[in-house]
């Protein structure tokens, strides 16, 4: 069975030595969130998550959520663990205290989320979607709606969902058909079918709050005719007590490749009572408040799975004996190709951790820094990094899961070892909240173009500055310099060419996204190598420098090749008749 | 549900227009195997496989093989389909007629195997292992053993297995412990436990013949102390009738990521009666007769899964409507990134098909060509290509399965669509018959060194010759020229450096293997582009030229970067203390 030990030392290194998390406690909102406080809190989270939630991962996969007559039965132990989790305050870690949150930095909540998603990514979806629903109502809801729903969503006592997808409307939200008809009492009758609704039905919480994208009777066609509605499973009386059950059901759940303990529901709204959140026909904007943070959350899910794959593969390779390596040792970690896989896993996971944590840090700065200029710059970074975090961390989770299976050999294919579950669980991360191809289009089509193109320039300037300031570490600075030059060049080209010929730019957008992320990780590895060089522990230092060297010499070097793909001619490929494929 | 239509036109194009399969019918042994005959036979195979075997793929995955009290129950329909398959002569297609085979070229049997492995790779393992067992006894058995076992293994009436792996002995066969103690009657008492035994127990055939690797009491330690034994489930009387059940049992089966309809058995030999095949302590050599062909077979399993992923993704993308592409069309095949994925899938599958078919063609030439020099050269190609076929086709199957899920979006993650099954089924292909890392070591450590290094030189010279003869197709010849130059350079370097410093060469062996395979595919795409240019059908021609262009501009260009990895310094990586990972 895969085991999980929270990588507290690695987390502390990134927070303190690379990202200087102390800067958060200098902000009024977070004065209490000192490095020591954060460290203590992460210790506590690790105990709970390792002890109570990780053990449910394998059995939850084996049993899965079950549907019977409209009810969803979750695997044994889930309800108890969820209750323990929210009652201990972990769901609301970064929610405002007025709504039963702890008021801590978003970054801290995401570090805990990483642990949770290593331990049990299916479990993590229940608090995860709850937070998404909370954020959407917090941003757009009326005061009355906030008072009705947020205290119990904020603590996690109630759970939440996002009801977006329909069979004909996946990526294409313009074709959503669910109808919302105004009623005399100010509510709306919601009618339609939704699919792929994570946590849509269960009895783990007393109430489930659905955030539903639907269309008013007189709404314009397409994406500008959508509105958002809050639709509780049980209506909430004025005194906060629960009233009658609302008119919708979970008509079935999906059988999936993985995340079996997370229920993926087909929901039928049959004139359900809902209340509009925000203004009419602003549904897309309302939803994207939540969606952008949800994409970062999915990136952390990927990071958690990367860590799970990496730490289990290392532990197995340190113990498993097969033959004799060239150096005479029997453990497979001494075989060069096994070592190559482990270093690639480490280089990816640790580099991605800096990307993800830095993005979360910028979320905090964008919302809470006293200086408007800092907030503006931080928001630029959040906008730029969101598709990178989502796509890179999740692609890596799947790749590293597969690589961990390879390290285990035939045993990796056997369910009881718990490694193949990583491959199955992590594939969904590349698909939901916008496929990774959609992330790449977001990067190229929107993020490169916003504010006159200043977002990627911020990154390129930052890396060039770091290179100018760096002394030593030529093994990293040389390929990083080449990568960032190529990235700058291709970015200019995309910014110019995309408007006139989007087919060309879009054809290479996934390669561009990967090249961008790898360059970002190169910058992270330069910073980690610099920080590690100051480190007192020689073993830790050697480990970090060797991993940095691996990344720089074997992964960062892919950037120019990927970027050459972006600019390669596409005419013949675009012209090829769809029927003759 | 994933569907399968045999790609007969693609198969015919490779056989006739690229590889000139007519050359086989010029050989005495295969005079009847004319292109027309082969084409007719493939039509018949396609009908049977599409009609009777493909429909069992999804239900077989859902039900899986079940174990009860030592018996294995296979999913419904498997036994009937297997009976139909062997009775129609498909198991013994390339086996010698004296043992109930059809005496057709190995290549033809592998083309049928590709179809079978698209339709149902779990099913394909039953005839596949039977063929492996047949080949091992044919090469090493006594006349009496051949007469006893081969007629019914040759037709597929009985099935066979390879009993190699033990819990402590996966890649490391030297640590095999199963004992074979000589008995007075000339037989041996086999005692020990084997794991991961594909098709180890079932009732689909009247008898199961196990080919077992075990150790004589006085055998030297390690890999040179292994011998091979034939151990039938039911003893065979002198008149060919079946006698008592042998003393071994299937004590459980594994629960696996995929290939659920294939039983993976734990076998307990408790003094079972076996007979030695070949000389004492030559077990490894005896087994490698079968193993080399088994590796090519696994490559074809990968190719079949590549085709399944590709054709389903294309069909889905041609039909699924989501939003509007830049060219105004609603089907997702018009979205540039979807098109990019489909072209990558096509470029990989079609290029790998030429690699696999050419390797199988060389097996026929090596065994049957009248000219000894041709046989020698053909055997060189088989030796060189075997790890490439095994590793590249299977890595690609997993990658393309994942890409197909991505094309399907969220629906790809749902079991009923049948696409996620490709990812799960194909991962085992990267592990068994030697992991793909083991293949890379075989390539670098053995194949590069054999016969004074002439194997890779044959390839490099062949490609350079093709480039010298080529006119036009600069989009392919330019990157192919760069790739082959880099490959030649790195090959020289590996041949020289590996002996003195194997850690360095071995560290990059997987990257080298991939670079070699991509260069081979570049050569294949040049040949396909040349052949397609002569083609009368403009749609087919445009399709092939566009796909060739995609491969040359976006995949072949990875070769120099991969090869740079091979020569990158490894000292710090090799020196890193195993405990500090």
Image: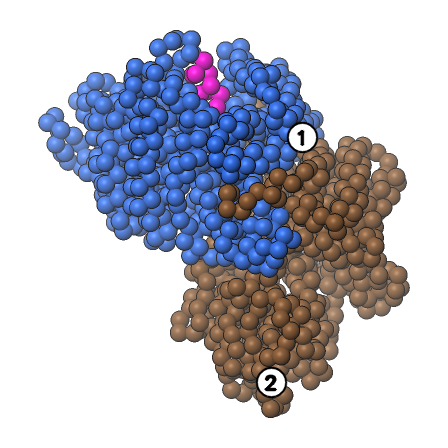
Chain colours: A blue, B brown
Position of A365 with respect to B516 (left or right) is left
Q: Which residue is mark 2?
A: B182
Give the residue furthest to the left.
Answer: A239
Using a 10 Å C-alpha cutoff, classify the residue at mark 2 as few (fewer than 14 neighbours), some (14 to 19) or many (20 or more): some
> Which quadrant holds residue A131?
top left
Q: Spatial distance from mark 2 to mark 1, Cα to Cα?
A: 61 Å
- Estimate the x, y position of residue A549 in percent, counting from the top left: 60, 34
Q: Nearer the viewer, residue B23 or A56?
A: A56
Chain for disc number 2: B
Q: Does B220 sit above or below residue A90?
A: below
Could you tell me which residue is drawn at 53 percent across and 15 percent down? A458
Could you tell me which residue is drawn at 58 percent across and 55 percent down? A329
- Estimate the x, y position of residue A97 in percent, counting from the top left: 23, 23
Label 2 element class: strand
Magenta range is A377-389
Question: Residue A561 got which mark?
Answer: 1
- Which secondary structure class fits the magenta region best? helix
Using a 10 Å C-alpha cutoff, classify the residue at mark 1 as few (fewer than 14 neighbours), some (14 to 19) or many (20 or more): many
């Amino acid at each position: 069975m895969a085991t999980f030990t929270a990588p507290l030392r690695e987390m502390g290194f990134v927070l303190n030595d690379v990202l200087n998390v102390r800067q958060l406690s200098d902000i009024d909102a977070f004065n209490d969130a000192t490095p020591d406080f954060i460290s203590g809190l992460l210790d506590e989270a690790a105990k709970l998550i390792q002890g109570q939630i990780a053990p449910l991962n394998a059995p939850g996969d084996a049993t899965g959520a079950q549907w019977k007559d409209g009810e969803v039965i979750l695997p044994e132990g889930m309800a108890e663990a969820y209750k323990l989790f929210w009652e201990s305050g972990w769901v609301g870690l970064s929610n405002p205290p007025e709504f039963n949150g702890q008021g801590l930095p978003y970054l801290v909540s995401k570090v805990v989320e990483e642990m949770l998603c290593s331990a049990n990514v299916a479990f993590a979806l229940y608090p995860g979607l709850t937070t998404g629903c909370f954020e959407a109502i917090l941003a757009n809801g009326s005061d009355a709606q906030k008072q009705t729903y947020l205290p119990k969503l904020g603590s996690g006592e109630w759970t939440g969902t996002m009801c977006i997808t329909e069979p004909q409307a996946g990526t294409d939200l313009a074709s959503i058909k669910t109808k919302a008809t105004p009623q005399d009492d100010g509510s709306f009758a919601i009618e339609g079918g939704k699919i792929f609704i994570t946590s849509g039905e269960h009895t783990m919480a007393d109430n489930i709050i659905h955030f539903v994208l639907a269309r008013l009777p007189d709404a314009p066609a397409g994406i500008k005719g959508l509105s958002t509605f809050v639709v509780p499973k049980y209506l909430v009386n004025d005194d906060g007590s629960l009233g009658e059950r609302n008119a919708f059901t979970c008509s079935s759940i999906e059988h999936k490749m993985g995340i079996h303990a997370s229920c993926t529901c087909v929901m039928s709204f049959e004139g359900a009572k809902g209340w509009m959140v925000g203004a009419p026909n602003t549904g897309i904007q309302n939803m994207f408040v939540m969606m952008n943070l949800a994409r970062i959350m999915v990136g952390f899910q990927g990071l958690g799975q990367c860590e799970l794959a990496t730490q289990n593969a290392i532990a197995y390779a340190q113990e498993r004996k097969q033959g004799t390596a060239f150096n005479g040792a029997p453990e497979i970690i001494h075989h060069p190709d096994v070592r190559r896989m482990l270093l690639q896993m480490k280089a990816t996971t640790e580099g991605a951790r800096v990307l993800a944590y830095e993005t979360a840090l910028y979320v905090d700065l964008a919302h809470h820094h006293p200086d408007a200029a800092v907030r503006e710059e931080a928001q630029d970074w959040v906008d730029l990094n969101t598709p990178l975090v989502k796509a890179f961390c999740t692609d890596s989770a799947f790749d590293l899961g597969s690589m961990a299976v390879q390290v285990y050999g035939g045993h990796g294919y056997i369910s009881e070892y718990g490694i193949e579950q990583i491959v199955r669980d992590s594939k969904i991360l590349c698909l939901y909240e916008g496929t990774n191809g959609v992330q790449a289009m977001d990067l190229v089509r929107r993020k490169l173009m916003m504010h006159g193109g200043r977002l990627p320039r911020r990154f390129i300037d930052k890396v060039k500055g770091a290179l100018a300031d760096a002394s030593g570490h030529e093994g990293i600075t040389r390929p990083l310099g080449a990568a960032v030059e190529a990235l700058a060049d291709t970015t200019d080209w995309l910014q110019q060419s995309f408007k006139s010929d989007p087919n060309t730019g879009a054809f290479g957008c996934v390669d561009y996204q990967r090249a961008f992320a790898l360059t970002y990780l190169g910058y992270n590895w330069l910073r980690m190598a610099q920080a590690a060089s100051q480190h007192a522990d020689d073993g830790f230092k050697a480990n970090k420098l060797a991993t940095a060297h691996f990344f720089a010499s074997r992964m960062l070097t892919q950037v120019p090749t990927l970027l050459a793909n972006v600019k390669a001619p596409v005419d013949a490929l675009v012209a090829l008749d769809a029927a003759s494929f």
